[in-house]
Image (tube, grey):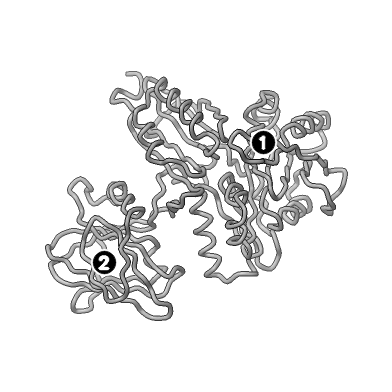
Amino acid sequence: MSETNRIPVTVLTGFLGSGKTTLLNRILTENHGQRIAVIENEFGEIGVDQELVINAEEEIFEMNNGCICCTVRGDLIRILGNLMTRRDKFDRIVLETTGLANPGPVAQTFFVDEGMREEFELDGIVTMVDARHFDQQLADSEETSTQIAFADVIVLNKTDLVSGADLDVLERRVRAINAMAKIVRADPERRAAVPMSAVLGIGGFDLARALEYKPTFLEPEYPFEWAGAYEFSAGDYTLTLQEGPDPGMKIVLCETLPSDNLDPAKAAERVFTLFSGDIASDSPGAMIEPALRAQHLDLPGGIEAKFVLRIKTGGSYWLFTQHLPEEFALTLSGSLGMELAPRVHRNFDPGHSHDARVGSFSIETDRPVDAERFQAWLTHTLQTQGTQLYRMKGFLNFQGANERIIIQGVHMVVDSSSHGPWGDRPRKTQLVFIGRELDQSVLTQGFDTCLTDGEAHPA
């Protein structure tokens, strides 16, 4: 079967009670014009045409990292093979996992088995989130964060049970676990009601399509959302914040450098590590001076909070903020009360948190990569951190090659292929990692050993 005729498969996952079956029923009854076969990995009534439902007993395997994972690997390959005999009866497949399943082994099936790769295309993993019970489920179950980490699309369900502010906080928490997934909020008046285009035909395992949806898809993620460069004279300034979605705001105030060239992206690489180090906490009225450290501004609810910025030496300074300034009505004013505007400013995609559990980070470089050194590094990485590495995506710019290489990884299974010549695109390597307790510094340092100073392509 040609690649264009492969059958798309959507994996639907989410913790117990998150609304998977409700969404499945919507998929089967919406007027989208597609015939859908369902592989159901749970017993019980789901209220759909039973001729479309295939019940598969899950198999229990003890994985090499010591955890027990529910997979459908054996039955899945058998059932997919049987479905091929009825290929003219459906256009796509939706596979619903159990509420306690790790979707990783399911995704791996479409990489590991050559027959599956030829016949089926993994369109994406859709994860349902119970907005009301997310915090409790996240604390009680590792599967909750794992399901989010593997997702290409995350549906926030039961939105009618939480306030708008709580939903904003929830979205940021989910984004901290998976910085590259698309987040969709279900209709508060109808459970699991989302546009079908948001969950079907998403191309989550197609990097080119992912970049069409989000051009910054593979850009580095940071623990701050905004940066602005201000021109200060010596003296005191007032930083004012109103109550916002969080009870505090982390900031960094530091001098610009000539090498920054007033480019927030260049300064970001220098500043982002400060947000994960020792952070001083300040209450309203505190005095803040430029320094290479982060400050945490405590914001008492319901009142305006003012902080003093003392500039001893006039010049150009960066202000990096954890959240967008408009979320806290942040203003910066001089001694006469006149509000200051930044010379330049930029919004950044919300980055990952520095939680020791599940998170994501990116690597980007325009230096060419040595293919042999990269393969050796990748092999070592999979051997040492493969069970913790849930997803990896990216483009590779190999030295001496004109081809743009796509790489996709699920746990210890990695696949790569050519995406055609670079053409007029900037030649650069972009990699995104999502996993549990990944050692970012070790991964980054190891990858750096693969870089060269030579030409990225033939003369």
The residue at which mark 2 appears reads as 341
Which numbered disc, 2 or 1, marks the residue that appears first in the sequence? 1
Looking at the rendered structure, the secondary structure element under dot 1 is strand
Task: Say which quadrant the C terminus sits in.
Answer: top left
The residue tagged 1 is 62
Q: In the rendered image of this protein, does residue 239 appear above or below residue 19?
A: below
Q: Residues within 10 Å of mark 1 (few under 14, many from 20)?
A: few
Looking at the picture, tell me which residue is in the foreground, 389 or 125.
389
Q: Is residue 437 above or below residue 427?
A: below
Mark nearest the camera among 2 and 1 is 1
* Residue 349 percent across, percent down from the top left: 43, 53
Q: Are marks 2 and 1 in contact (CB under 8 Å)?
A: no
x then y, percent, for residue 239: 28, 71
Snapshot quadrant of residue 93: top right
Residue 70 placement: quadrant: top right
- Residue at 69% from the left image edge and 59% from the top image edge: 192
Q: Amino acid at mark 1?
A: Glu
User: Quadrant of the image for the N terminus?
Assistant: top right
Q: Residue at x 45, y 23 (%)?
A: 375
Which residue is drawn at the image coordinates 52% and 34% (left, top)?
Answer: 386
Mark 2: secondary structure? loop
Please state the horizontal and vertical placement of residue 267, each as a whole percent of the image. 27, 49
Residue with the most extreme bottom position: 303
